[in-house]
Amino acid sequence: MPIYNDIIKTLNIKVDNLESIDYAFKNNHSYYFIKLVSRGVFCPRCGRYITRIQTYDSISLNHSIFISHHTTVIYKRRRYICPLCRVTESEPNPFQSSHPKLTNETVKNVLILLKDYNQTFSMVARKTNLSPTIVQTIFDEHVQIKRKPLSEAICIDEFYFSRKAENKYSCLLINFKNGMVIDVLPSRKKANLRSYFRNIPQHERERVKYVSMDLYDNCRDIVKIYLPYALICADRFHIMKIINNALNRIRCDVMNKYSENKKSDEYYLLKHKNNLLFKNSLDINDTKSDRNRHFKMRYTEGQTLDMILEIDSKLKEAYDLKELYCIFCEANVDIDFRKELLETVIVEYKLSDIEYMRNIAMTLENWEEEIINSFHIYDGRKLSNGPIEGRNRIVKIILRLANGYTNFNRFRNRLLYVLNKHETYSEQILDVHKIRKTGTPKKKR
């Protein structure tokens, strides 16, 4: 009996309830033959205690808890018959799940494996010797997560879901303070956002004080209506990305002028040293020099950057405007004076001869109030979409590994289950009709 302690423990069988156990190994597959002690049952119809055995059933159960090899439990189950009303009843056991061919530990193992975002349904199916459909069914029956309550500070951002879906972009709501995912919305369209927020109780919506978002007008309009006491904060890093994109376009335009001679100094600098343009000037190293293979001389990062900016006056102007916005972001001033600084930045962008920068001036002016709001301090940090960007990386990994999802409800539950560290599964079987997609009925011939 000691050699079977591990399997008895995983099956949750008490030793005094075990009549016999045997083992066989064939083709890297373990078989355990189990028979429980006869305890009798109560008749489900008349309530009479019955011990008369009508027959035995051999039940084959997948017990996939070891990744290295497959395990099957052959359970010899008694079926009792009531001598009074002739009703039959099977004996209970502690290891068979609601799925007739799986043990409880197999179901638990599937759900534990799916907690890892690097695991797809197909991967888990291969590890547990199940079909992907069974793994999806287990997940749908045990993981159905409700929306979390809105917090005082939330982040909203969209992500690309699928080009084949009705809504190609979905939305993610994050608690700014602890990074918990509040919910995943199927669409970023205004009508969908309106429908979602107005179904949230008013007292909960009034609790929100700050909402951080990218520069998306639909979100801003909805937040103003349904979260009336919230300050809307434009994500500073998103604005910085827009400015860097404009700077990069100008760099490419200048570089293309020298494309006929790709061995020229100008083309080399713009092609291979362009990262210095997007680096914060405070991080540029002016002391340490490295040997440059192209020039066959030693240059510091500062000297290399100066050579790049001397190539074209428009490139230098765009770089200076980028640095001007960086100075505005890093200035340690109060909110009132910061507004004056931003107005100065907008004026400089408007006066630029570069069309890209003038367009950015319009964006800054349109989101001026929201940009200033993003410098408020909450929980010791400036408000931004930083917490949501890390989650977006995991979302992309899940979608890429699975080669996309066709069922958004299942995808939503998977995200909430994976991204929220302390989220767990339900021990009870849940209704899956609202999760599974209903197919189109076949036409009668």
Image: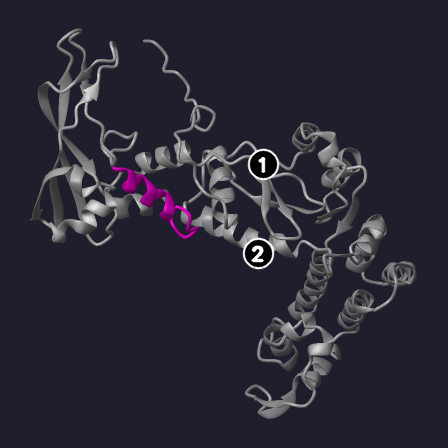
From the viewer's perspective, is 167 left or right of 131? right
Q: Is residue 249 above or below residue 230?
A: below
Tag 2's secondary structure?
Answer: helix
Foreground mark, 1 or 2, reads 1
Magenta residue check for 70 = no
Q: Range of the magenta residues?
A: 103-119
In-front residue for pair 244/157: 157
Q: In which quarter of the image is residue 320?
A: bottom right
Which residue in the structure is indicated by mark 2? 390
Location of residue 206 in the rendering, given as x and y in whole percent from the top left corner: 77, 37
Q: Which residue is drawn at 51% across and 49% down?
A: 419
Q: In which quarter of the image is residue 156?
A: top right
| Residue drawn at x 70%, y 87% as measured from the top left | 286
Inter-mark Cα distance, 1 to 2: 20 Å
From the viewer's perspective, tell me whether residue 256 is left or right of residue 16. right
Q: Which of marks 1 and 2 is nearer the N terminus?
A: 1
Which residue position holds label 1?
Answer: 147
- Give coordinates of residue 309: x percent, y percent: 74, 77
Could you say where residue 366 lies in the image, as x and y percent from the top left? Answer: 83, 48
